[in-house]
């Protein structure tokens, strides 16, 4: 965990070509350069992300904000390649913001990023440092099962969607509490689309070993402090002897029953399959049947809200009208209980927009913005539906508000430039973004396509 984020930069030089975009990348220790179409940009790396066991990504700072580098170092192949999410991009650039969700699992804090420390698992240590006692510090092993498992799940259970629970007791997860005090996690009813990087908890829960005993958890095989546990010895607690039909065991149990597999969302990496299969087959690729809550909040309305938001989110991501409609129905039914909930309003508004009900979509998105007036993405969504409703001037005003709230919001500049028919006005918008990031290849490419004044 202490290697989740660091300042160690590769002592290496490298170069490679990203064929889909015809981009060339060059690495020279802590400097990375991208070249495309006669343009070039170079950035100094500020942080490294990840331990390097599988891969290591990098972060740059532009205008005081953090952005993910489009390339990463992969230990499996001892080479550099595109970072996860960048592989198929038509025009990669250093423009993917490092969000609070990224920092949640890779850093101890948003203001001054630092590797994950003791308090992430053991809670606030202020009193413990003053007067050490087992009574004023969280020890996950001594917690009830849901609270114990939540300590690991805060980073190792992304599911298909993670929804913030409004009005919860805590603004963020705190060790010693259940994850649902802050978030609801939604997972597929069954494995779909292959294994994911952060799905270890789901896989373990689906294993025959866990379903038979109910005793396995992350701490069964992983020791966060000290020397690693002998995983095969843990297996022999239940499997003390092998059946006569079992092949001669020449390797540790996990080598055959928990093999390394390529994941669908981890770039060029492979991770341990935690399903503990009796016969190691391929990763499941079944079509998803639906979503379910990992653990339901105590409030039934909150559960329906989380499920509805997740269905809309996953439906938009995967292009599934069926999921979007399921989410819409759930949210429409529960909306009277959350009339000023910006998340609910925004999802309902965007579904109405997809259904071409533009006027209703505008009303609902305006209500969402009124409920959360400092949210730049909400203003951008409002601008999209306003444009659909033919209200161009109002859409322009909404985008200006989004940019005022977040000057780094590149998509808002592109939408604003697209609203203008006058090339001079389009150019002015692109030049404004270049004031924030003067090296942006995408902005400079867009500028080159516009007629000169």
Image (cartoon, helix red, strand yellow):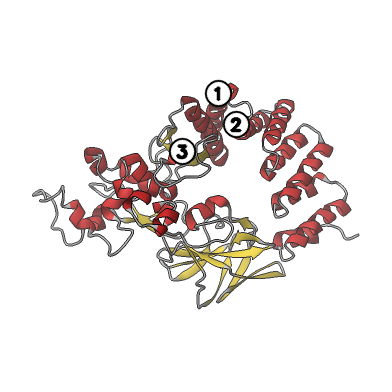
x, y (%) of residue 437?
A: 72, 62
Q: Where is mark 2, residue-wise? A: 344
Residue bearing the label numbered 1: 334
Which residue is pictured at 63% across the width and 64% down the height? 61
The tag earlier along the polypeptide, 1 or 2, is 1
Q: Mark 3: which secondary structure? A: helix
Residue name at image x 28 percent, y 53 percent: 258
Q: State the SS at label 2.
A: helix
Relative depth, front residue between 161 and 215: 215
Identify which residue is drawn at 46% across, 62% down: 50
Quarter of the rendering containing residue 248: bottom left
Q: In this view, does 438 lie above or below 386?
A: below
Residue for badge 3: 181
**Marks 1 and 3, how far apart in space?**
20 Å
User: How many labels, in total?
Assistant: 3
- On screen, residue 18 versus residue 415, left or right, reads left
Q: What residue is drawn where x is 67% and y is 43%? A: 375
> Which of the 4 image quadrants contains residue 291?
top left
């Amino acid at each position: 965990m202490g290697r989740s984020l660091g300042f160690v930069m590769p002592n290496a030089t490298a170069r490679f070509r990203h064929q889909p975009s015809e981009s060339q990348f060059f690495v020279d220790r802590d400097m990375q350069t991208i070249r495309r179409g006669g343009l070039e940009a170079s950035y100094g790396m500020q942080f490294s992300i990840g331990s390097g066991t599988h891969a290591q990504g990098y972060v740059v700072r532009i205008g005081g904000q953090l952005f993910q580098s489009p390339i990463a170092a992969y230990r499996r192949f001892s080479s550099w390649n595109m970072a996860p999410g960048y592989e198929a991009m038509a025009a990669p650039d250093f423009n993917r913001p490092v969000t609070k969700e990224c920092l949640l699992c890779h850093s101890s804090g948003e203001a001054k990023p630092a590797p994950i420390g003791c308090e992430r698992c053991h809670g606030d240590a202020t009193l413990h440092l003053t007067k050490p006692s087992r009574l004023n510090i969280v020890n996950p092993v001594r917690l009830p099962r849901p609270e114990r498992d939540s300590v690991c799940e805060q980073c190792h259970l992304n599911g298909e969607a993670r929804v913030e629970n409004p009005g919860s007791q805590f603004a963020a997860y705190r060790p010693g509490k259940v994850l649902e005090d802050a978030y609801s996690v939604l997972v597929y009813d069954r494995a779909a689309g292959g294994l994911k990087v952060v799905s270890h908890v789901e896989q373990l829960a689906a294993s025959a070993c866990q379903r038979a005993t109910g005793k396995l958890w992350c701490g069964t095989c992983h020791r966060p402090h000290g020397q690693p546990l002998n995983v095969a010895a843990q297996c022999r607690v239940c499997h003390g002897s092998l059946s006569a039909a079992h092949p001669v065991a020449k390797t540790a149990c996990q080598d055959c029953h928990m093999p390394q597999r390529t994941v669908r969302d981890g770039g060029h990496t492979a991770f341990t399959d935690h399903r503990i299969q009796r016969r190691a087959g391929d990763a499941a690729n079944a079509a998803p049947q639906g979503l379910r809550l990992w653990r339901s909040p105590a409030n039934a309305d909150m559960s329906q809200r989380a499920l509805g938001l997740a269905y809309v989110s996953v439906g938009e991501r995967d292009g599934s009208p069926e999921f979007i409609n399921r989410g819409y129905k759930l949210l429409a039914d529960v909306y009277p209980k959350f009339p000023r909930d910006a998340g609910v309003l925004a999802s309902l508004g965007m579904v109405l927009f997809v259904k071409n009900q533009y006027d209703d979509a505008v009303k609902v998105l305006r209500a969402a913005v009124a409920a959360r007036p400092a949210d730049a993405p909400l203003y951008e969504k409002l601008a999209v539906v306003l444009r659909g409703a033919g209200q161009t001037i109002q859409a322009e005003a909404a985008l200006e508000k989004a940019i005022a709230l977040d000057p780094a919001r590149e998509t808002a500049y592109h939408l604003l430039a697209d609203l203008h028919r006058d090339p001079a006005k389009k150019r002015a918008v692109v030049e404004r973004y270049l004031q924030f990031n003067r090296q942006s290849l995408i902005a400079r490419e867009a500028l080159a396509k516009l007629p000169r004044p």
